[in-house]
Amino acid sequence: MTVEVVSLGCRLNLSESETMRAMLAGADDLVVINSCAVTAEAVRRTRQAIRRARRARPDARLIVTGCAAEIERAGLTAMAEVDGLVANAAKLDPRAWNVGEVSVAPPAAYTRAYIAVQNGCDHACTFCVIPQGRGPSRSLAPPEVLREIAAHVARGTREIVLTGVDLTSWGHDLPDAPGLGALVRAILSAFPDLPRLRLSSLDGIEIDDALFECLAGEPRVMPHVHLSLQHGHDLILKRMKRRHARADAITLVERLRAQRPDIAIGADLIAGFPTEDAAMHAANLAIVRELGIVHGHVFPFSPRAGTPAARMPPVPPALGRERAAELRAAVAQTRGSWLTAQIGKPLAVLAERDGTGHAENFARVRLAPGTKPGTILTMTPTRIEEGLLA
């Protein structure tokens, strides 16, 4: 392998890594670390990945890009293993790598394609450094989105996933400020044979009417909503500088379930945010049950230098980790009941390359040996094995 791209962090990074992998296909003996800096733990894993890559390929040229290349620039430059950095905003520009323009789409490496339709963020959540690493919100214009999807559909991709740093802000910077719902409708119209369209993390307060209608009633939009929720207590949400309240999330999920009862809810949740007391943590636990969160992304608060939250009265780290474990246990309990309810129901499953697949609601399913990746098949689970339907 002459070119290796190691991707850490979000789905947007995953999408960008595929583009870089194609763009750099002709390079000689190169390792790229597409880094993440969303938490201190993410930076630690980035450094770990750099050291691991250098041990595995001691003679390769090792370049770091991604959010940590912006936010932790001095520290990463000082690492002996690193040969250079490419700015996050320039990583998809062939000129930054001294290669020619890319005339072909990246090869299909997955059974689904992640399309980065938005980048950057205009908000100022008190715990987040991502705007420093990604810059202001920018939207990919609809013709460019459709061209990229067309390339994947032509190769037989069955599921498209729209991704972004702040996906629901897509369109705000375009002429006439279209909402994300307009883009979803345009995709469905342009590709009538595309069986599955999925959305990555959404800011519930920004879901426009057209997008809500697609989530609630369009069968080709998957019944799976992952909310950038962050917490279940209003005062903590205010201190995070989030733009929604607890009641907003509850009302949104109730409205979605009223029209699409099979919809699966996921959410990001932070435990141990500064000033969080026992009652606030209890509200965080309760929101898991109230929303029926079955796909949970839970992590303890990690202070990031330069953010307002880093200057707030902290929760002891050990207590934050303990509360995160309690949140994960609450999600696991809700998820277990949900998986049990799937037994005996016919599910449309997209087969992956590892012998498993994902149902429309993103439940993971164990498939029969030899199932061809990329196949959508109907199967009726009869049991749960190691957290998978089977």
Image: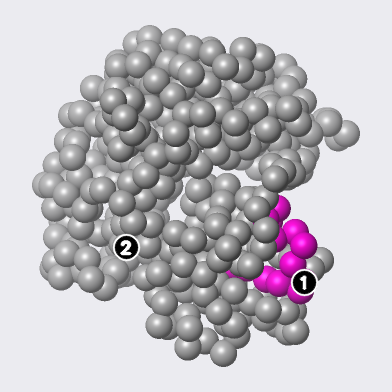
Please tell me which residue lies in front, 63 or 242: 63
Tell how many labels.
Answer: 2
**Which quadrant: the N terminus?**
bottom right
Question: Marks 1 and 2, how far apart in space?
Answer: 31 Å
Residue 32 lies in the magenta stretch: yes
Q: Please identify the quarter of the rendering in which residue 48 is found.
A: bottom right
- The residue singled out by tag 1 in the image is 28
Label 1 sits on a secondary structure element that is loop
Residue at 31% in and 51% down: 136
**The magenta stretch spans residue 208:** no
Residue 322 visible in image: no
Magenta residue span: 21-33
Viewer-proximal residue among 144 and 126: 144
Q: Quadrant where the C terminus lies? A: top right
**Rendering coords of residue 254 (x, y %):** 29, 18
Give SS at disc 2.
helix
Question: What type is the residue that disc 1 sits on?
Answer: Asp
From this view, report whether residue 338 is shown above or below residue 331: above
- Say few, some or many: other residues with alpha carbon within 10 Å of mark 2 (under 14 / 14 to 19 / 20 or more): some
Q: Is the residue 277 above or below the residue 188 in the image?
A: below
* Residue 77 appears left or right of 212: right
Label 2, on which residue? 132
Residue 296 in percent (x, y) is at 43, 42
- Looking at the image, tell me whether mark 1 or mark 2 is earlier in sequence order: 1
Indicate whether 207 appears above or below 304: above
Q: Which mark is residue 212?
A: none
| Mark 1 burial class by Cα count in 10 Å: few <14, some 14-19, many 20+ | few
Which residue: 20% across, 28% down? 248
Could you say where residue 138 lies in the image, as x and y percent from the top left? 37, 44
- Seen from the viewer's position, the closer of residues 229 and 169 is 169
Q: Amino acid at mark 2?
A: Gln
